[in-house]
Amino acid sequence: MRLLMAAVHVFKPVSIAIHLHVSHIHPVPHRRFSIKAMASHIVGYPRMGPKRELKFALESFWDKKSTAEELEKVAADLRADIWKQMSSAGIKYIPSNTFSYYDQVLDTIAMLGAVPPRYNWTGAEIGFDTYFSMARGNASVPAMEMTKWFDTNYHFIVPELGPDVKFTYASHKAVNEYKEAKALGVETVPVLVGPFTFLSLSKPAKGVDKTFPKLSLLDKILPVYKEVIADLKAAGASTIQFDEPVLVMDLESHQLEAFVKAYSELESSLAGFHVIVETYFADVPEEAYKVLTSLKAVSGFGFDLVRGTKTLDLIKAGFPAGKFLYAGVVDGRNIWANDLAGSLTTLKELEGIVGKDKLVVSSSCSLLHTAVDLVNEPKLDKEIKSWLAFAAQKVVEVNALAKALAGQKDEEFFSANAAAQASRKSSPRVTNEAVQKAAAALRGSDHRRATNVSARLEAQQKKLSLPLLPTTTIGSFPQTLELRRVRREYKAKKITEEEYITAIKAEIKKVVDLQEDLDIDVLVHGEPERNDMVEYFGEQLSGFAFTANGWVQSYGSRCVKPPIIYGDVSRPKPMTVFWSTAAQSMTKRPMKGMLTGPVTILNWSFVRNDQPRFETCYQIALAIKDEVEDLEKAGITVIQIDEAALREGLPLRKAEHAFYLDWAVHSFRITNVGVEDTTQIHTHMCYSNFNDIIQSIIDMDADVITIENSRSDEKLLSVFREGVKYGAGIGPGVYDIHSPRIPSTEEIADRVKKMLAVLDTNILWVNPDCGLKTRKYTEVKPALQHMVVAAKLIRAELASAK
C-alpha cells in the first residue's frame, strides 16, 4: 500500500472542519488574480488538524483499531480543507506536500528510498509498515534517531547515510498530493526538503566513519530529485518550492560550493518552473546570500524577516533584477498578531528595491510551529485574544498585507489591528514593576552554590545511602485514559476537589508501589496531576494565558499546548509542594521533587516579543527558585529541575552562542543557588546534540544530570571518550522511551558497560532516556524491570572484580 493514496474512501471516521478566520477579508475566487494584483504565499501549514484529528487517527491505526484506509481518509479530509480554505482566503502560492503522517524529513527519506537495511525494505513503494518502523521502531529493530529541527521544539527523523547507500524514487507522495489538490480545483506549490538541507542534516550510518562527507552523495540523490521534478511537471505543476533552511547556518566554502552544484545540476530539469528556495529561522549570512541569489535556476528567494532582520540590509544592498522576493514578514514561530502597519512600511520599502511585480508577502517560515485557529478558543480572555493570531489568522494577515500593497487596503481590518497593538502596549496586566526590578538585579551576578560538586555529592551520599549505579526514572509515568478522565472532570467541575485529590493520591500510590516492587532507588511520583510539564507550571504562575486547542506538533502524533507568556512572571503560591510531600510520605526511599526549569518553560512557551527573552527567563528563574526553597523546607532532599530545552534554544549562528548560554545557564543556577549541600539537584535534557555545549552543561553545576543517549546511538558518550572530565553524577539514558519496543536486560547491560568504559563508576546513574508519559504500562513495567536487573547484574560484576 502506498504511503499516500489520493483515492477517497467511503468510510468517514472523523468529521473534520477547518475554519480560517476571515472576518473583514472577502473570499477571492481561486486564481482570479495576478501576481501584480495580489501576491501572497504560505511556507507551510499545521498538519494535525484544528482539534488534533490526525493525532487520534494515527494512534488508532497504530493500536490496530482502524485501517490504513481510514487513516488515509482522515488525512485527505484535512488536506482538502486546508487547501480550499487557503484558496478562499486569497492566497496565491498555496503549499502542498507539507502535510506528513510523521515528519517531512522522514517523507524525504522515503522519497529517496534511503531506508536503513535493518528495516528489510524490499524496494517497492514505501508503505506504512516501513515508514512507521523507521519513525517508531518495531518489535525487532529500533527507530531512527530523532532530534530537534533547528532551534524549534519540532523533532525530525535523522537520515542515516553512507557511501554504499542506494537511492531510488520510492515514494510518490509529492506528486500525489499535488494531483489531489488539483482534482479539488486548487493549484498548489509542491514543497520539497532541498537536497542540500537533506544531506546536511543527515548522519553517517552505523559503521560508517563519522567524518564521512555527506555532501559527496549529491550526485546520487539528484537523479531522484530530477525524477520527482519530471513527475510534477507532467502533472501540470508550474511552481516548485525547495526548503533550504541550512543556508542560515555558519557554512564553509565547500558547503556553499555543494549547494551551487546541486541547483546547477537541477537547472535543466527545472526549466519552465517558477522555482522558490525558502530559508528561515535566522539571518542568511552574507556569503550564503550572495551564492543563493546568484542561482540561475531559481526565480524566487524566501527570507525570514522576523528572526532574520539583518537580511533586510543585504536585500537593500543588492537584490538580483527580475527575481522574486518572498518577504516573510508574518511570524510563523509565535502567536502574536502582526503589526500590520509596521509590516506594510517594511514591504513598501522592499517594493522600492525589488519592484512591485516581484514582491510576494509571505509567512516567515511554516506555520507548523504555531497553533491552528483562534476560532477554536471561545473561552480565551477577550483582551488577550485580540492580541493573538494563530495559523488561520496569519493566513488572513498575509493576504491583508498583499491586498494593501496592491492598493486594496482593508481600513477596518488595519484599524482593529492597530487598536489591539495599542491595547497590548498599554495594558496594566502586562507589567509588574516589582518583578522587573528583581529580574534586573540579577544581571552581572553569578549565583553559584558555595561548595563544589564533589563535596556536595559526598554529603548527599551520606544522607541518601544510594547503591552503586543508582536507578531512577525521569519523572512522568503513563497517563492512562482513566487518569485523563479524572483531570478532565475536575477541570469541568464534575467532581469535587476532595474526589480529585483522592484519585490523584491513589495514582501516586500505584506508581510508588510499582517502583518499590521493581526496586528502583530514587523514586518519582509519576506526575499524574500534570497535563504537560510546562503548561502545569504556567497555569500557576502570573503572566501566563492558556488555550483550549492551541496544539502544536512536537513529533509524530505527539502535540503540546504551549502557554502564552504575555506579561511579567511571578509565583503567587507553591505549585508542587503538596503532591511531592504526599508522595514522599508513601515511601522511605528518596522521592524526587519534579520541576520544569526556567529555560525550558521559556523555550516551550509562546513568549512575549516586547522584551528580550533573557529578561523573561530571569523572571521565571526567580519563580522556580521560590519553589525549590519551599520543597527543601518541606523535606524533599532530591529536586529535579528539568532543562530539556536548553540546547534547543541555542542560536543557529555561532557568534550568538556565548550570550545565550551565559544567560540560560545563569537562569538555571539562580533556581538552586540557596539550597543546602545535602539537597541533591538533578536536571534532565533530551533529543538534542549536546556535545558542542558540554562545557555549559558542566557550568550548570547540577549534582546529577540525566540525558538522552540511546536513540542517538550513544553519541553523547563520544564527548567523554575525547577527554572531557565530568565530576557530577550523570545518567545517559539506557533505552528509548519514544518507541514501544521493550529492550532486553542484556541490551541495557551492554549500554551500561559502554558507559562505564568512559565514565567513573561512582558518578554513573541508570535511567531511561526521558519521561514515560507517552508509553503504556505493558511496555513500562518490563522495560524498567530489565533496567533494574541490568544495573544489579553489573553491580555484582563490579563487586566480584574487586
Image: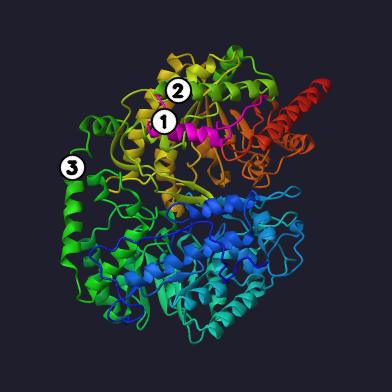
Q: CA distance from mark 3 to mark 2?
A: 38 Å
Instruction: State the mark number for residue 490.
Output: 1
Answer whether residue 221 is magenta in the image: no
Q: How far across and down, in percent of the image, does residue 640 sit? A: 51, 28
Q: Earlier in the sequence, mark 1 or mark 2?
A: 1
At x 55%, y 28%, the residue is 526
- Mark 1: secondary structure: helix
The residue singled out by tag 3 in the image is 427
With 772 as the anchor, is 434 left or right in this view? left
The picture places residue 13, in percent across and down from the top left corner, at 54, 57
Q: Quadrant of the C terminus?
A: top right
Give neighbour class at mark 1: few <14, some 14-19, many 20+ (Cα, 10 Å): some
- The quarter of the picture where residue 329 lies is bottom left
To which residue does mark 2 refer? Answer: 499
- Are circles 1 and 2 on residues that touch, CB within 8 Å? yes
Question: Of marks 3 and 1, which one's residue comes earlier in the chain?
Answer: 3
